[in-house]
Every structure is written in C-alpha cells, then in structure tokens.
Amino acid sequence: MSDREQQKINHNPLLKIESVSKTFGGVQALRNISFDLHSGLIQGLIGPNGAGKTTLFNLITGIYKPDDGRIIFDNQHIQGRQVHELVRIGIARTFQNVEIFGSMNVIENVMVGRHVRSKCGFWGAVTRVPWMVREEKNTFDNAMEILSFVGIEELAYRKSSELPFGWQRLLEIARALASNPKLLLLDEPAAGLNATETRQLGHLLKKICATGITLLLVEHDMSLTMEICDRIVVLDQGKKLAEGTPKEVQSDAAVMAAYLGVEG
C-alpha cells in the first residue's frame, strides 16, 4: 500500500457502500455489496459482463434505489435521492455510451454541466440583470478553463455531434467536471478509444484526481485500470469477489479464476 493511499484511508471514507442489494424481476443484480471509497483516490470497479458494475453506478447516482442497504456520501445517506440532488451535493458521472447534446456546440455542452451551480432563474435570464450577466460570463470562463484542462479548448465552437468519438469522450468528462464534483464516476471511459487515446485518458484521469476529485472507474481495459487505480473492487455475478490494491487483486486466485479464466 502506497504512502498516499494509506494517508487517504486513515480518514473517513467519502463514499460508503453498506450491504447494498438490488433485484430486477427476480434476478439478483447485486447481493450484499459493501466497500469504502476514500477521498483523493482512483478506485476501480471491475468484473465480467453482468457482474453488476453499472447497476451499482446507477444506485450511487440515483437512477435506481437499492432494495436493501445504505449508500453514504460525504456523511449523508443518499439512497433514494433524486439525480439532480446528488449532482448538487457533488456526484457526477459519465456513461458507457457517450451522452452529449449533439445539436449544441462544445462550450454550450460544458456550460450546461455548470447549470447546477447557477443561481439564475427564469426571470434573471429574461431581464438580464447585471448579476445574471456576470454569472453567465463566469460560467463561460469556467467552461473554457475546463476545456483547456482536458485539452480540447480549440474545439469550443465546434458542433458536438461532429466531433470524433475520442473527443466526444473528453467533452463528456469536461461537462461532468463543470458541475464541480467531489466524486466522479466513469463508466468505461476508454471504450472505443485507440491505444494512444487510452494513454492520454489515463494521464487526464490522474490529473483530475490530483485536483482533489475522487474517481470511481468501471473499465474493461485492464492495463489502464491496473496502471492508474489505487484500489480495485471486483464483482462477479452480483457479489463482491475481492478488494485491494492492483497487485493484490491480480494475484487473487478467485479473481484469476472468475474474471481472467485462470485456475488458481
């Protein structure tokens, strides 16, 4: 365990999953899942297809409600809360299939992500009062800073639907960052990327973590996962199979058998 990881784990977890279960039509998608995620770390969530990874993401982000168990974020019980409420308290996510507003340009997409932090309502937008104009400028400036941070500021006025897939991935991450999250969940961010784009993504995720944002990552690219994650949780058929550092997980006989297809 690295000094950085040990220092983070000595504090209370940012996210705590306690005995969480979820069933769909009699199929047990998740069964009694528990683990902690500590601030300032990149944690991977891996497992075969159908292991329950995206279901768990959907529980954390308010799309589903758990049947049993508790989800605690920043010392608040959040199970059953609405998606927009969770974004406001600091949880953002990206999706396995890129979700952007294709008819908007790049900068507009990122500004939408900042909307949750905006105080401007309908009448502010209509009357264009001075404080609203200042807030709109601040939102624009913040969006441009984020685009620069992820490396696509030169695309600010390009129509989003016209971007190559790799840049759309970066745009989705930029929009998530615009909500000023404490926790960023990434659902297969390397899917569809080539080797060069995947390496660049790894550098970006480390850079995001270095700003103080905690990351929870679902990813099938094991090279990327093992390289950038501080800790990894392994799911298999809705149950937690293992948890530990990348080195510990890689050497776990149960993981090798269930996930890698290797007999221990």
Image (tube, rainbow, N blue to C red):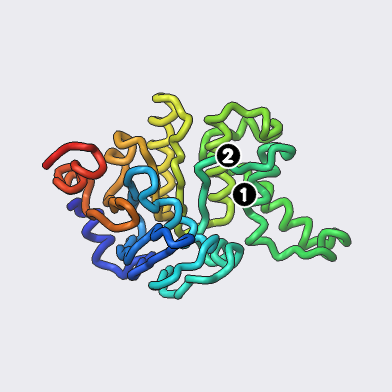
Q: Mark 2 points at which residue?
A: 171
What secondary structure is marked by label 2? helix
Compared across the picture, whether 184 is left or right of 131 comes to left
Q: Disc 2 and disc 1: Cα gap in Å?
A: 14 Å
What label does residue 245 carry, if any?
Answer: none
Name the front one of labels 2 and 1: 2
Q: Is there any visible trace of residue 206 in the rendered image?
A: no
What secondary structure is marked by label 1? helix
Q: Which amino acid does label 1 sit on?
A: Asn
Compared across the picture, whether 264 is left or right of 62 comes to left
Q: What is the crowding at mark 1: few (fewer than 14 residues within 10 Å), some, or many (at least 20)?
A: some
Residue closest to the eye, 38 or 19: 19
Residue closest to the eye, 47 or 119: 47
Q: What residue type is labelled 2?
A: Leu
Vertical comparison of 129 with 144: above or below: below
Who's the residue at 66% across and 38% down the image? 106
Q: Residue 99: where, in percent of width, then height?
A: 60, 43
Vertical comparison of 105 with 12: above or below: above
In the rendered view of the protein, which quadrant contains the C terminus? top left
Q: Name the residue under label 1.
A: 142
